[in-house]
Image: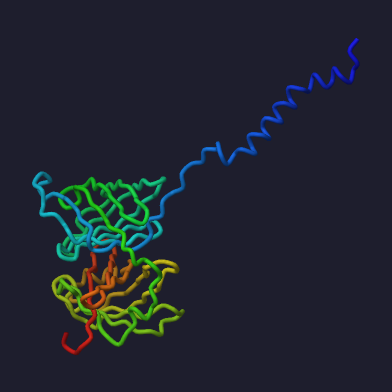
């Protein structure tokens, strides 16, 4: 007769072997465990060397390529701007691995022209964002944003100087004044004294810029006032993002994208260091 203690041990042997195997696999886990990929982080400023290949209004004739596309990406927000073409894309997206999906609102000549345009794309972290727009005309095609290599945190002194920022291309948006002293620090006051033309004729505003910690970006919020176009004042609060690009052979650039859902107050600015510039 087999002793009772041996019978009990033999009965539990398979369970002991399974437990031992589990421990062995745990010890080797770093070598064999397959983990899901982490989501890419596209946060940052994308310089003005990006491009978009889109259509004319008939949705079949290719439009002249946009070759100065730049953008800002933060916390699920995507803002793309072509200053020369006066076209802005403002959207939201989610990230899964290296893939993005979402929607954008399109502004042409400072007016909203399309909403809920489907967006799909891919992030190459620290290099570029490529994507496809599923709308019509200027919202139908592909694009690429190129990541700016100087994407470290920006000191507020970079933008708070005894100067005005003047639009590089569009005369429709007024000059900007930036002053230190906004509360709470380290934000800065941003204002326009009443200029511009067309949609933003005689518009002024007051607001603030605040750096986003650890990024090359600022949040911006302004309230419009005194605009000749009464429609601008129906929803006077504009919000968005700003960034700064260093230029080796000319003044620094301030890139600003502000929208209120119906209108787009966006553009690239250059330093105005002398009176009358």
Question: Residue 51: horizontal and vertical position, in percent?
Answer: 20, 56
Question: Residue 182: horizontal and vertical position, in percent?
Answer: 41, 82
Query: What residue is rendered at 10% in x and 54% in y?
Result: 64
Residue in front for this viewpoint, 167 or 244: 244
Left or right position of 87 against 92: left
**Across the whole image, how many numbered discs are drawn on residues?**
0
Query: What residue is rendered at 28% in x and 58% in y?
Result: 146
Question: Residue 220: horizontal and vertical position, in percent?
Answer: 35, 71
Q: Residue 155 lies in what quarter of the image?
A: bottom left
Query: Quadrant location of the N terminus?
Result: top right
Q: Is residue 203 visible?
A: no
Query: Quadrant location of the C terminus?
Result: bottom left
Q: Residue 80 lies in what quarter of the image?
A: bottom left
Query: Is 117 situated above or below 112?
Result: above
Q: How is the image coloured?
A: rainbow
Residue in front for this viewpoint, 177 or 205: 177
Q: Is residue 110 visible?
A: yes
The residue lying furthest to the bottom in this view is 275
Question: Residue 150: horizontal and vertical position, in percent?
Answer: 34, 67
Residue in front for this viewpoint, 101 or 121: 121
Query: What residue is rendered at 89% in x and 13% in y?
Result: 2
Query: Is 125 situated above or below 148?
Result: above
The residue lying furthest to the top in this view is 1
Query: What residue is rendered at 30% in x and 87% in y?
Result: 162
Left or right position of 109 against 225: left
Query: Is 87 situated above or below 30?
Result: below
């Amino acid at each position: 007769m087999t002793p009772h203690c041996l019978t009990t041990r033999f009965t539990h042997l398979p369970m002991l072997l399974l437990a031992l195997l589990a421990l062995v696999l745990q010890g080797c886990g770093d070598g064999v465990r397959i983990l899901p990929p982490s989501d890419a982080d596209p946060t940052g400023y994308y310089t003005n060397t990006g491009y978009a290949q889109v259509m004319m209004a008939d949705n079949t004739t290719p439009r002249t390529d946009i070759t100065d596309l730049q953008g800002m990406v933060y916390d699920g927000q995507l803002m793309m701007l072509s200053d020369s073409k006066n076209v802005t894309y403002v959207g939201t997206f989610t990230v899964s691995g290296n893939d993005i999906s979402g929607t954008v609102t399109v502004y042409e000549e400072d007016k909203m022209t399309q909403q809920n345009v489907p967006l799909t794309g891919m992030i190459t972290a620290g290099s570029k964002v490529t994507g496809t727009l599923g709308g019509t005309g200027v919202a139908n095609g592909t694009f690429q944003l190129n990541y700016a290599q100087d994407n470290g945190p920006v000191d507020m002194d970079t933008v708070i100087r005894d100067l005005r920022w003047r639009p590089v291309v569009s005369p429709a948006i007024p000059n900007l004044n930036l002053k230190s002293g906004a509360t709470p620090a380290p934000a800065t006051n941003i204002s326009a004294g009443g200029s511009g033309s067309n949609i933003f004729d005689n518009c002024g505003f007051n607001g603030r810029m605040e750096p986003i910690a650890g990024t090359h970006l600022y949040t911006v919020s302004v309230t419009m006032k005194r605009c000749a176009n009464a429609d601008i004042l129906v929803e006077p609060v504009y919000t968005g993002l700003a960034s700064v690009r260093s230029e080796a052979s000319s003044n620094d650039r301030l890139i600003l994208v502000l929208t209120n859902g119906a209108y787009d107050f966006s553009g690239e600015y250059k330093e105005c260091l002398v009176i009358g510039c």
